[in-house]
Amino acid sequence: MQTVLTGITTTGTPHLGNYVGAIRPAIAESLTPNTRSFFFLADLHALIKCHDPKQVHQSTLEVAATWLALGLDPERTVFYRQSDIPEIPQLTWILTCMTSKGLMNRAHAYKAAVQANEEERSADPDAGITMGLYCYPILMAADILMFNAHIVPVGKDQVQHIEMTRDIAQRFNHHYGEHFVLPEARVDESTAILVGLDGRKMSKSYNNYIPLFVPQKTLRKMIMRIVTNSQGPEEPKDTDCPLFQMYSAFATPEQTETMRQRFAQGIAWGIVKEELFELIDAQLATPRHRYEELMRHPEHIEAILRTGAAKARAISAPFLERIKRAVGISALG
Ligand code: TRP
């Protein structure tokens, strides 16, 4: 039995890139035998990046509704909200006391923030950097170690955090005895990374994304806005372009092959866009309907999350007791 765990920071609206890159493979994986999966809404992590309470709250709702609408089965997985598990911040503190400051100094996200300050010639290299950002990897380590996950599916940018988690766990195990499993990052190179409307990677931070569950009309309009070159309709076209790539992320291998041939023969960009829209819309129509239904009933989502939290805490509460005992915190008599 393998434990797979991953978290989603609740700061934005899920988009097509999140779907093909993370949500779709994670849900597929959760349905395979011999895996126990944990998916959670990383709302404590959200506070690091976002200080707008409305946005954090709304995003938590949207992300939860998205996963459920796309077929996450809360019976087969442990689906919870990070902040519902009080053992996680407690474990974070215990791990913080086992984490060397130098390790955190080397975190990419922190270093990038310092570098940005230096480039702006700010007098203080740590200007605007919170302890939340600085200690981000320790909270993430607690998320993972709490449930002794073997496999952590993440994007490339998160691999360093998994390595840090291993470092922290190893140091703890060395000092207090074997308590934590050393997790492995899994970066699936074959999962598609979608290009956004402007030709860069589809990302919240570039604001070039297509939200997953916009109304059909909006979806169509946004697809029509994807950048292309100015080649005429009859000219043969290179498949190394955002439209083809997006098409293949949603199409079957056969459909992709046929489209490749039509590119070689020459096909109008407008036709590709129209067919891409139809392809995506057909796949999202049912989940979109479920999503809208779920968004009308946040109390239903809340109930699912509370059940998930109870399942998670049945594991985290006794495990934290064990860790506390290991470090010398337990009843006196
Ligand atoms: N930091 C991750 C991200 O931004 C989200 C996350 C939080 C996470 N805790 C996690 C991912 C634990 C995997 C495991 O994408």
Image (tube, rainbow, N blue to C red):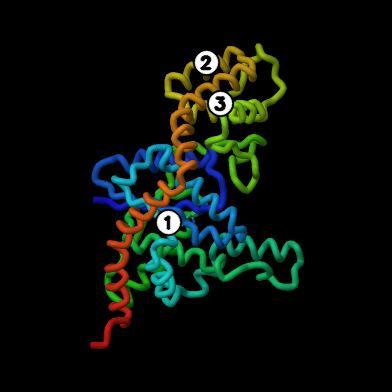
Q: Amino acid at mark 3?
A: Phe
In this rendering, the answer to whether 8 lies above or below 73 is: below
Q: Which residue is mark 1?
A: 81
Question: Percent position (x, y) of residue 147?
Answer: 32, 60
Q: Could you tell me how many numbered marks the image carries?
A: 3
Residue labelled with disc 3: 244
Structural distance between the alpha carbons of marks 3 and 1: 36 Å
**Helix or strand or loop: what does disc 1 sit on?**
strand
Mark 2 / mark 3, whichever is N-terminal: 3
| Residue 167 visible in the shown view | no
Q: Callout 2: helix, strand or loop?
A: helix
Q: Quadrant of the C terminus?
A: bottom left
Q: Quadrant of residue 227?
A: top right
Q: What is the CA distance from the residue labelled 2 to the residue labelled 3? A: 12 Å
Is 113 or 5 nearer to us in this picture?
5
Q: Residues within 10 Å of mark 1 (few under 14, many from 20)?
A: many
In the rendered structure, which amino acid carries the disc numbered 2? Answer: Gln
Q: Quadrant of residue 98?
A: bottom left
User: Disc 2 marks which residue?
Assistant: 261
